[in-house]
Amino acid sequence: MYGYGYGYGLDPTIILVLIGVALSLWAQGRVNSTFSRYSRVRSMTGMTGAEAARRLLNAQGIYDVTVQQIAGELTDHYDPRTKTVNLSQSVYGATSVAAIGVAAHECGHAMQDNEGYAPLRFRSALVPVANFGSSLSWPLILLGLVFGGLGSPLVEIGILMFSLAVLFQLVTLPVEYNASARAVRLLDAQGILAGEEVNGTRKVLNAAALTYVAAAATSILQLLRLIILFGGRNRRDR
């Protein structure tokens, strides 16, 4: 069987997938090593991640957000639906520079939610659409190939659905970078961290942000691969 317009043999567009995998592995390794390094640096104030989070939220007049512990490693996140800052076990009760930085980052999202930060609202609105598109994209593409070939509208709809997931990844970038910027600024302003501690937290959050950059790049590369593959077959079929 011929493969996506390239005849027999290896599909050369697989290199795009491999680049995405390499980027993701590099970014995850970077955040793990940076977090591990600064998780061994105790903050001078001795505050835990949970205490720092509560202090930052109170300083911004946010009293309707709950700070709670959840299971897992680096599973920290803010849930706007339940108004909760969820901190992992390695962050909630830890007194390290890394833990306080991660906790502050999640508080940054709570602050975004509190003030109606437009990119966060847009991302939240995209969540169901992106999940729907991501889950349906490949089934639609495969159905289109089986029943109508690459000229089938189902293939085009499938690619469009996948592009919604790409859009979500792109919108995520300014949301995450803004939350990190808020975290670093407020930790310094509130005196929770100082001097080199602030710089250490900045490194941790910058490393974490790279995982979102890698995710966005991987999604874009996958979308580009779909376009190349199906476009190539269309040209051959004409």
Image: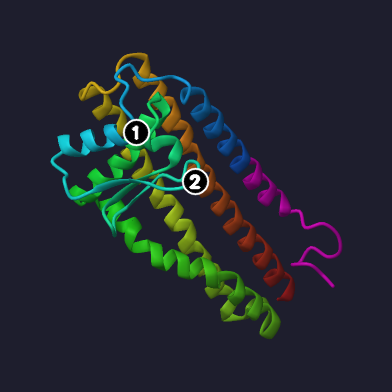
Q: Is residue 182 visible?
A: no
Image quadrant where one finds the N terminus: bottom right
Numbered tag placed on residue 72 in the rendering? 2
Q: Which residue is mark 1?
A: 49
| Residue at 31% from the left image edge and 57% from the top image edge | 122
Q: Residue at the top extreme?
A: 195
Image quadrant where one finds the C terminus: bottom right
Q: Residue at the bottom extreme?
A: 147
Front residue of 165/29: it is: 29
Q: Is residue 80 visible?
A: yes
Magenta residues (range): 1-22
Q: Is residue 25 left or right of residue 181?
A: right
Amino acid identity at mark 2: Gly
Disc 2 crowd, CA 10 A, few/some/many (<14, 14-19, 20+): few
Q: Is residue 12 left or right of residue 73?
A: right
93 inside magenta stretch: no
Give percent across and percent down for residue 129.
41, 68
Give percent across and percent down for residue 156.
56, 73
Indicate the secondary structure of the residue bearing disc 2: loop
